[in-house]
Structures are given as C-alpha cells and as structure tokens.
Image (cartoon, rainbow, N blue to C red):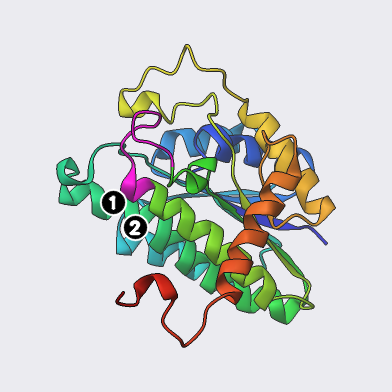
Amino acid sequence: MSTLALVTGATSGIGRAFAERLAAGGHDLVIVGRRKERLEEFAASHPEVVVRTVAADLSTDEGIDTVAEICAAEPLTMLVNNAGVSHYMPLAELPAAKARELVHVKVVAPTMLTRAAVAGMQARGEGTIVNVAGMIAFSGPAPHAQMPRRAVYAGTLAHLVAMSQTLSAELEGTGVTVQVLCPGVVATEFHERQGLDMSAVPRMSADDVVTASLRGLELGETVCAPGVEDAGLLDAVFRAELAAFGGQSPRLATRYRAV
C-alpha cells in the first residue's frame, strides 16, 4: 500500500526538500503552495510517484479550509506544516495585514490542518505530524541588540513548540507521532523574500534540516533542533519549564506581598 504525505510551503526551501525526500522514499504526495507553476514543475519532474498539486494561500481562511478538507478526507501518513512568512519588524510598525497573515500562516493553518488530519490518523493507528518552527521560538529573553525585532514571529513559533509538545503527550499510545522542527538560519529564499541579506551568516542547507527531522523521528524526538549538538541543553529548558509549572501554589509568592 502506498503512503501519502501532505507538505505545505512545498514550492521552495524546507518544504521542497521534504517533498523531494519523501518522493524519493516512494511516498505519494499532496503538495501545497502559493505558486502554482512551481508545484506543477515538481509534479512533472517526479513521474515515479503520484503528486497532487494544490495552489492555496494559507494566509486566508479559504486557503486553510481547502487544505483542511484534504487533510480530513485523505488517508495521510504524514503531514508537514511548513508554510511560512517572517515579517521581522517592531510590533508597533507591523502593518495589521502582515500581522494577520503571519498569525494565519504560522498559527491558524498548522492548528487547523493538524486538527483535520489527526482524527483519521488516530483511527488508522498511525501517522506523523511535523510542525516546522525554528530556534527563534526560544529567543524571547535575548536582548534586542542581538536579534531582529520579531515579537509576533517569535510568538507564532513558540505556539508551535507548545502545541506540538502538548499534542505529542495527548496522542501517546495512539500510533500518531508529533514533532516540532526547530532549525536555525537555513539557506533558502525565506529571508530574501523579506529583503534580508543573510549571505554573511553561516546557514544550514534545507536538505540537512530534513535529514535531521527524519532521523529525529527515528530517535523519538518531539523537539528536533538540527543545529544543537548538545541535546541536554534542550532537556534543561524543558525541565526548568516543568519545575516552574510544578512550583506554583495558591498562596501569593513572598515577593508580591506587601512589606
């Protein structure tokens, strides 16, 4: 029986690399993106598998609903939520339309597509969901001098991390695996489309990011950070979060009491 994977943002970068790797592994594909000509070019160059192209804009409710219907109706073995935009800028300067686009693409779309796919995966007793976020999800405490203004963008990626971790625990024992993929800077068109010159910054290849994701799934990693050599750093973050969560009390903390 053939396996079927759906990849969003499949016209370039990490999404294209996922589609290439999955096609090479014999998966039939549903590939989603805004640029119809690139989707069709990919399909024409991969006659060895069945490729369905879906031109959809995931910054719109219509686009999300179109792809969600496919996620709910088709027997997906893998869903890769990769579509993305950045819009790095101070929150006060971020146009409302761009803020809305960012939240739709990186929060609403992966949430609704995952919701649509997961019931069928549970019923079949197997499936994999990969949500592509980024290491910027962990950058909140960084001084602004070290990082671009990114409040909304970082927040959307942090949502993907928390949602994926929580959903992974929720689906334990069902046969459905969830991973959040957190690369650093990747050599794709992503930054170029925002007018950012990253040529002087060391960057990982999109193919290496996919290699890490697939190997991370084999290792049972819920959070996959392709460029972090010491996985204990991530474990320390998550242990600290659980310690803070478990350290709460109904009694007002001492530091908040009147002296």
Q: Position of residue 252 (x, y in %)?
A: 41, 82
Question: Where is 108 relative to 224, above or below?
Answer: below
Position of the N terminus, as image quadrant, is: bottom right
Q: Which mark is residue 30?
A: none
User: In the drawing, does residue 209 fall left or right of residue 96?
Assistant: right
Labels 2 and 1 touching (C-beta < 8 A): yes
The amino acid beneath tag 2 is His
Residue sitting at x 62%, y 25%: 204
x and y percent of residue 59 in the render? 32, 53
Residue at 67% across, 49% down: 234
Q: In the visual, does 86 lie left or right of 201?
A: left
Location of residue 247 in the rendering, given as x and y in whole percent from the top left corner: 58, 75
Image location of residue 171, percent across then percent down? 69, 76
Q: Residues within 10 Å of mark 1 (few under 14, many from 20)?
A: many
Residue drawn at x 77%, y 48% as measured from the top left? 216
Whether residue 109 appears in magenta in the rendering, the answer is no
- Tag 2's secondary structure? helix
Residue 103 sits in quarter:
bottom left
Foreground of the two, 40 or 93: 93
State whether the magenta stretch is mostly helix, strand or loop: loop
Reading the image, the residue beneath label 2 is 104
The segment highlighted magenta reads 142-153
**Image position of 87 (left or right of 125):** left
Q: In this orientation, which residue lies closer to the viewer: 135 or 40?
A: 135
Q: Does the magenta stretch include residue 152?
A: yes
Mark 2 surroundings within 10 Å by alpha-carbon count, few (fewer than 14), some (14 through 19), many (20 or more): many
In the displayed structure, does residue 240 sit left or right of residue 35? right
| Residue annotated with mark 1 | 101
Image quarter where the C terminus lies is bottom left
Q: Between marks 2 and 1, how big is the CA–CA gap?
A: 5 Å
